[in-house]
Image: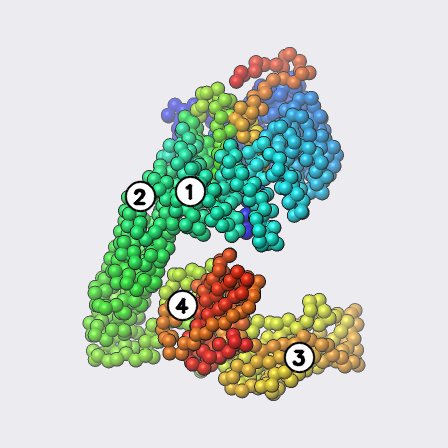
Amino acid sequence: MAQFVKKDDDRDEDEYSPFHGIEKGAVLQEARVFNDPQLDSRRCSQVITKLLYLLNQGETFTKVEATEVFFSVTKLFQSKDIGLRRMVYLIIKELSPSSDEVIIVTSSLMKDMNSKTDVYRANAIRVLCRITDGTLLTQIERYLKQAIVDKNPVVASAALVSGIHLLQTNPEIVKRWSNEVQEAMQSRAALVQFHALALLHQIRQNDRLAVSKLVTSLTRNSVRSPLAQCLLIRYTSQVIRESSANNQSGERPFYDFLEGCLRHKAEMVIFEAARAITELNGVTSRELTPAITVLQLFLSSSKPVLRFAAVRTLNKVAMTHPMAVTNCNIDMESLISDQNRSIATLAITTLLKTGNESGVDRLMKQITNFMSDIADEFKIVVVDAIRSLCLKFPLKYRTLMNFLSTILREEGGFEYKKSIVDSIVILIRDIPDAKESGLLHLCEFIEDCEFTYLSTQILHFLGVEGPKTSDPSKYIRYIYNRVILENATVRASAVSTLAKFGAMVDSLKPRIFVLLRRCLYDNDDEVRDRATLYLNTLGGDGSVVETNKDVKDFLFGSLDIPLVNLETSLKNYEPTDEPFDISSVSREVKSQPLAEKKTAGKKSTTLGAPPAGPTSTVDTYEKLLSSIPEFSTFGQLFKSSAPVELTEAETEYAVNVVKHIFDKHVVFQYNCTNTIPEQLLENVVVVVDASEAEEFAEVATKPLKALPYDTPAQTFVAFEKPEGVPAVGRFSNVLKFLVKEVDPSTGEAEEDGVEDEYQLEDLEIVAADYMLKVGVSNFRNAWESLGPDFERVDEYGLGPRESLSEAVNAVINLLGMQPCEGTEVVAANARSHSCLLSGVYMGNVKVLVRMSFGVDSSKEVAMKLAVRSEDESVSDAIHEVVAN
Amino acid sequence: MATSARRDACPAIKNLLLLDSEGRRVAVKYYTDEWPTNAAKLAFERSIFAKTLKTNARTEAEIVMFENNVVLYKFIQDLHLFVTGGDNENELALASVLQGFSEAVTLLLRGNVDQREALENLDMMFLCLDEIVDAGMILETDGSLIAGKVATHSIDDGAPLSEQYLVRPL
């Protein structure tokens, strides 16, 4: 125990502790006094205190030790000394005896539960309820119900709180106590009322009507206890939330009650009500005002806790209603110098959210002084807030960029530095004017940067952005310095960056080659290899040649294949004479968690597709299909859909279908499962009626020979369709097969079978089937690089919709494209939304879509759709999909 | 709506800590599994102690966000008192718990609030923690009521005189 060792060290300091040099073994010996026939209460209390001290310091007792202590402690119930009894209760709770041990003390505790002494009753209830299991509970239920309405508040609270805990394990018993609990609600003791309300609500929490009734009746009578009033406010907001879904127009129910609580005499209640109001769904500024006013008063309180609570709540409000908080700006500004740095940081970030453009300079001055004396974790919060501010007021980039570069040069840990670098990178990307100064700040930073990761990230970024600036040559010195001064990882990264400058800027080429040639003598393999590769591919023989596009693509093109897919393909590749073909790797991005997408969109600026989630099943499909001779001539598989269920769950035969799209063909893969143990199916085929799919013609079927019980297998049907045409249609399916009875005991099938068929649900080929979900990490760059040549813009009315979010998702699903940068998420209550999509259309045509949605009061949704692609006809095709 | 779903529940206390001026435990009580081992608990105590050490929490209770928890604290002489709640908790409700905690400790130690006195009366400190919070649920927030419940060191009616000893006056 570190604690004990430390105590010994401190001996010289003449420090006094009654527990100095205490040892578990000795205390356990001492515990034998519990067995003395003549009990010394005082001594026993002291020994229990020592045992508790040991446990509290983190000492553990073995099972045997604990049992021994427990048994001797039970003897102490003989004593009538209240102080000792209290300690006995405590140690029993700490020892948490097993159920067979509990029996020993049950009768003693039950006796105490009925004692005349209030302290015994209250504590015995708490102990017994803590250590008991359900069986005992029925025996003591009667006493507990009595205790709930006990006139002594301590006893009543003990019973109610125990009820709250027991509700988790034995809800059916506790629910029977409703009447008593309701009676306890009338208690004059504040805390009893609080405990009773908490228990009553928990008993009824799954019954919305009952909770609503409870709230209605209590909001009329005044509740005395501040804590109980806080609970009531929480329950009221819950009722408001649940009722607002049904009740759109008119007054918000219970708002008057919440507003009334703002005038309560307890600060706790005022604050709870103010916070509840700020968190109402779709709160209006009229509703907000009174809450903001009381919070503003709290801001100048002498109590740090009040200031903290208020500024934290206002900070949250500022995210959604910045205008409502601007009234507090003066009070906020004075909090920047608050002793409590948490309060100061919250105040700053609130100001950054609510501030207007003209105040930025003054605010930044104040923050500069402030930054030097807060911890990194607060600084990161401030940096994030400054980044959002800069994106909001791009004209102020100079001030903000200078601020970021100043703090970048100061002391700080990795996470802090990383957040600054990320912010600068984002500003460079989004604010063109900030590019040159931002890049120079980054260059200066890597001159003296201790973090390899950040250096390589910045070098990579320089390689992408630097060559596009007006004077690329000024960055070369900084980059080459890295080759001389840094570790191997950074050197290798710097070599790649140099090569990028060489490839992109022809005038610099000869000089770059000189530098690269020097790198050929580096003592690290990777650095030498990179230099050699670049010199050879870029034509480093001294002649100034135009680097051709293929080479550039090969060296610096973004890898638009998900790495996971590439990895699986490489693993599947068997060494033969045929080289590995990277174009055969699927580009399908599996849907991935939102968080991951967001970070990918923010952090990496050139990496093609964000890293994909689960391993692609496309490779397995591809292998499967190419192994079937009938389909091997169809060429490259473009896309495989997710399985579509064609049967209801839990039917005799479960069938789903995967749609494989080829350039000139479509293959349906029916995955069938036989769920009847007494049957064997043979010659299974799906008969497809394509009368509602005119452009498709059936070319091949591959029946399934046998389908035994619970062994999934596949049958295929292939259709031909016009090349490159996104034909759509509806197909109806019937499963046909030969049924043979199987003897379950032997597993053998009978000789003869019966022909049978089974109707499946219809299946559709839709436009989305011709679209691959392929993400881009930087939509803006991708959009600009596609250019406006084949841009098509049009507006559509989508009619009345359930919600904006529903409309957005409907269009995304219709197009089957990958949402970018998290734009598929629509903020609650938003009146308008923009969404970015990207994908690859049949024929490997890259498509990007920008959609702006708006919704009016009658829920009519209008959409503006802008499409850019590499092919005019594809842009038109996307519009046709939406128009239909 | 995950946050508001949690908000519907009662205010919950995650731990109560009574540390000395070097961050060592006098008496502590944890009510959640958030710190499953003694090592995790010690680490939490060490870091919250170091984080708050330089602040002045003597006249008014102070507050800090720490590892997604709200921690309220107050120093009395060489004792450091902490109350931890979830980051969505009503700060003022937590403050009332800390207020009760510090008042009760002051009353129980009869004004001599220091580490030595607290250790001498450690039994009362344990009982005090026990009377403030029961398994995370706030039991009582009034300092004098808490102290009153702890200090009922009398003998129950039927006890023989020989077992009685002098009751410490409050």
Number of the label disc, if any, that sits on residue A779: 4
Between discs 1 and 3, the one toward the N terminus: 1
Q: What's the residue type where badge 1 is placed? A: Val
Residue visible at 56% across and 25% down? B145
Question: What secondary structure is marked by label 1?
Answer: helix
Q: What's the residue type where badge 2 is placed? A: Phe
* Mark 2: few/some/many CA within 10 Å (<14, 14-19, 20+): some
- Kindly indicate whether the residues beneath marks 1 and 4 are on one polypeptide chain: yes
Which residue has dot 1 on it?
Answer: A311
Between discs 2 and 3, the one toward the N terminus: 2
Question: What secondary structure is marked by label 2?
Answer: helix
Tell which subunit mark 4 falls on. A
Number of the label disc, if any, that sits on residue A370: 2
* Mark 1: few/some/many CA within 10 Å (<14, 14-19, 20+): many
Q: Is residue A754 left or right of residue A553?
A: right
> Residue B75 versus residue A90: which sits nearer the camera?
B75
Between discs 4 and 2, the one toward the N terminus: 2
- Kindly indicate whether the residues beneath marks 2 and 3 are on one polypeptide chain: yes
Tell which subunit mark 2 falls on. A
Between discs 1 and 4, the one toward the N terminus: 1
CA gap, disc 1 to disc 3?
62 Å
CA gap, disc 1 to disc 4?
36 Å
Q: Number of marks in the image? A: 4
Question: What secondary structure is marked by label 4?
Answer: helix
Tell which subunit mark 1 falls on. A
Residue A552 picture location, percent across and down? 32, 76
Which residue has dot 3 on it?
Answer: A732
